[in-house]
């Protein structure tokens, strides 16, 4: 009997780029025993390697766009590819739609650059969203850094340029306010409906007091094209309506939403 020939060279797997991929692509791959391409240390499970599923659903929970990543990928990094992955959706009239009418996200997506990314799908003309400046002299609150302009650049994918209604209230804060301000100079009709926003736009510096309490101090201002800031006062609505009041809940009403629907239909 002859000797058994040595085994041939093993096939090496091509390394994949880390990040988010559509779940349907992942289903065509063979599962590996551990530490696959789309796993990462889980920050809430003692660093065990795990994966995370990201979803955009319609209002009844039906998934529209699905992705998978390592467990250590921050949720905010998943928004852009998920929005791009929304397929054409059949509508009652006209062509299929490829944009959400509304997008709801929790605190994990509270970042100004994501607001500008969504605003980029609402224009076909570049425009100034706002300019940002920071205080740079503890002894003089009027001294700031040179304003840094931030622009909205039209997205490469499908865009909507028709009228937009923005619902605001006292719970509109942080990235919700920067998004609202980023739509103020949007070409086309943009109507704010509800109540003034909270007036807390920027990241804050936390300072501990001797008695153990904490003070949060905002250090930045966001300026409009006319060099106006809404820090503290909040952004006022064009049309005032009650928002989340006890009377509204008791009567099962949403006056701001109903007003928005009427404005957009007129």
Image (spheres, rainbow, N blue to C red):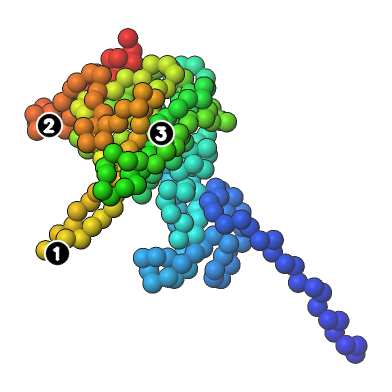
Q: Farthest top residue?
A: 266
Q: Residue at x 58, y 67 (%)?
A: 32
Side of 214 where 84 appears, left or right: right
Please provide percent x and percent y for residue 92: 44, 19
Say whether disc 1 or disc 2 marks the residue closer to the N-terminus.
1
Side of 201 where 250 appears, left or right: left
Q: Is residue 24 visible?
A: yes
**Residue 239 drawn above or below residue 134:** above
Please provide percent x and percent y for residue 48: 44, 71
**Residue 22 drawn above or below residue 33:** above
Side of 116 where 38 appears, left or right: right
Q: Residue at x 50, y 53 (%)?
A: 68
Q: Nearer the viewer, mark 1 or mark 2?
A: 1
Q: Quadrant of the C terminus?
A: top left
User: Dividing the picture into quarters, in which one does residue 31 lie?
Assistant: bottom right
Which residue is tagged 3?
131
Which residue is tagged 2?
245
Which residue is tagged 1?
210
**Residue 247 drawn above or below residue 22:** above
Q: Looking at this view, is 260 or 22 the one in front?
A: 260
């Amino acid at each position: 009997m002859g000797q058994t020939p040595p085994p041939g060279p093993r096939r090496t797997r091509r390394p994949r780029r880390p990040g988010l991929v559509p779940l349907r692509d992942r289903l065509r791959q063979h599962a590996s025993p551990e530490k696959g391409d789309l796993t990462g240390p889980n920050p809430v499970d003692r660093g065990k390697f795990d994966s995370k599923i990201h979803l955009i659903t319609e209002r009844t929970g039906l998934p529209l766009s699905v992705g998978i990543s390592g467990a250590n990928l921050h949720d905010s990094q998943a928004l852009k590819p998920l929005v791009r992955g929304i397929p054409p959706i059949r509508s009652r009239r006209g062509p299929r739609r490829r944009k959400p009418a509304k997008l709801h996200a929790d605190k994990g997506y509270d970042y100004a650059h994501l607001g500008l990314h969504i605003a980029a799908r609402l224009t076909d003309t570049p425009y100034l969203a706002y300019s940002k400046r920071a205080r740079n002299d503890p002894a003089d609150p009027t001294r700031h850094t040179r304003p840094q302009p931030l622009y909205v650049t039209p997205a490469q994918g499908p865009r909507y340029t028709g009228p937009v209604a923005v619902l605001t209230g006292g719970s509109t804060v942080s990235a919700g306010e920067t998004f609202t301000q980023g739509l103020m100079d949007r070409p086309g009709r943009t109507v704010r409906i509800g109540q003034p926003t909270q007036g807390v736009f920027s990241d804050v510096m936390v300072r501990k007091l001797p008695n153990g309490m904490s003070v949060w101090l905002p250090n930045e201002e966001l300026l409009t094209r006319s060099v106006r800031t809404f820090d503290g006062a909040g952004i006022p609505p064009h049309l005032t309506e009650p928002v989340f009041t006890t009377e509204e809940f008791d009567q099962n009403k949403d006056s701001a939403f109903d007003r928005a629907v009427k404005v957009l239909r007129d």
